[in-house]
Image (cartoon, rainbow, N blue to C red):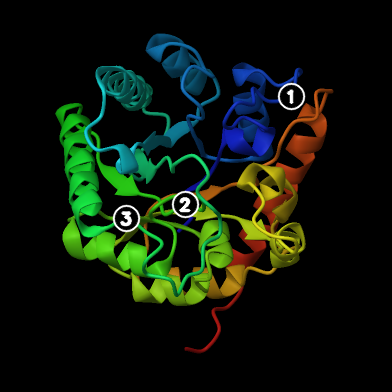
Amino acid sequence: MRWIAGAPVSFGVWGPHSGAPDGDGNSVLGALAGAGYRGSELGDPGFLGDPSRTADLFAAHALAPAGVYVGLPLARGRREARDREGFELTCRTLRAVVDRCALEASAPGAPPARVVLADDGAPGLDAPRDPADVTSGLDHAAWLEAVDVLAEAVAVAAGYGLPTTFHPHLGTYVESAWEVDRLLDSTPLTLTLDTGHAMLAGTDPVRAAGRWAGRIDHVHLKDVRTSVCRRARRGGPVPLRQWWSEANVRLGEGDVDLAGVLDVLRRDGYAGWLVVEQDVAPHGGPQLADFTTDQVHNLGVLHGLLDRRPSPS
């Protein structure tokens, strides 16, 4: 369980953000490689360039591709043509990186790079929702449409020889544990365990690792402070983007029992990527050095947790 990847999201590359002004794709991958990470996810579409450019950057830094995150419009039924075109480009890009990595033989034995599917939510969707409120999700008819959207995405990715996995995410229609259970009951999809999203959606990440053992094939390791969410929402619902970056902290400085999660994964023979993520928002000034320092810290903490003797079960 030593295949550890980073992600551009830890350098402020997410949603409408383009990262720090001193942190382009080349410098971000260089920072991850220099810190000792063995791979990286690809980040937002276009951040690393076209498929050929993206493959060149991964090869230049001897990094293996861990995967790429893709939001799908599960609440809007069938995908429109432009959604399909964007998804195809994402698959082509990941395929190019995978092929280049194999050609360079830079990461023999690396876990598969996965297309990480997720719901992209809907305007005004609250986060986190009450995990006990089963009326807050998609109704039966809408869920069947969502299953069709997912099946189409899986088929497209498979056409490129790429495996998929699904990422439950705050502010979407697959957020709470009951929604994850419904996903696993109604599709053959495997699961990305994101410790931060699980924690803030009301699901203990340690219990989640055990509850969905056998279906988890990708892991995002985040640490979060639950107090930030509680404080932000004290006067009522607040959009996720207004507090999400503040809730994400360096590994070991939040409320997630990372050691417990790793113990369960180790016990169950998990052999996929461990992707370290610390979702941060850029403030408009140079931050590459600070972001890099945080990721060096996170990798050191993770190595320490992996080296410790597992707790008795």
Q: Amino acid at mark 1?
A: Ala
Query: Percent x, y for residue 8?
Result: 59, 32
Which quadrant of the view contains residue 256?
bottom right
**Relative height, residue 289 to residue 100 (above, below):** below
User: Is residue 269 in view from this perspective?
Assistant: no
**Relative height, residue 229 to residue 66 (above, below):** below
User: Is residue 245 in view from this perspective?
Assistant: yes
Q: Front-most of 297 and 102? A: 297
Left or right relative to 200: residue 245: right
Left or right relative to 169: residue 221: right
Q: Nearer the viewer, mark 2 or mark 1?
A: 2
Is the residue marked by circle 3 packed among few (<14), some (14-19), or many (20+) residues within 10 Å?
some
- Residue that protrudes farthest toward the bottom in the picture: 312
Q: Looking at the image, which residue is at 19% across and 53% down?
A: 141
Q: Secondary structure at mark 1?
A: loop
Q: Which residue position is annotated with label 3?
A: 138
Is the residue marked by circle 2 packed among few (<14), some (14-19), or many (20+) residues within 10 Å?
many
Q: CA distance from mark 3 to mark 1?
A: 36 Å
Q: Amino acid at mark 2?
A: His
Tell me which label, 3 or 2, sits earlier in the chain: 3
Q: Are marks 3 and 1 in contact (CB under 8 Å)?
A: no
Q: Secondary structure at mark 3?
A: loop
Q: Amino acid at mark 3?
A: Leu
Q: CA distance from mark 3 to mark 2?
A: 15 Å
Q: Which residue position is annotated with label 2?
A: 169
Q: Which residue position is annotated with label 1?
A: 20
Q: Nearer the viewer, mark 3 or mark 1?
A: 3
Query: Percent x, y for residue 210?
Result: 39, 76
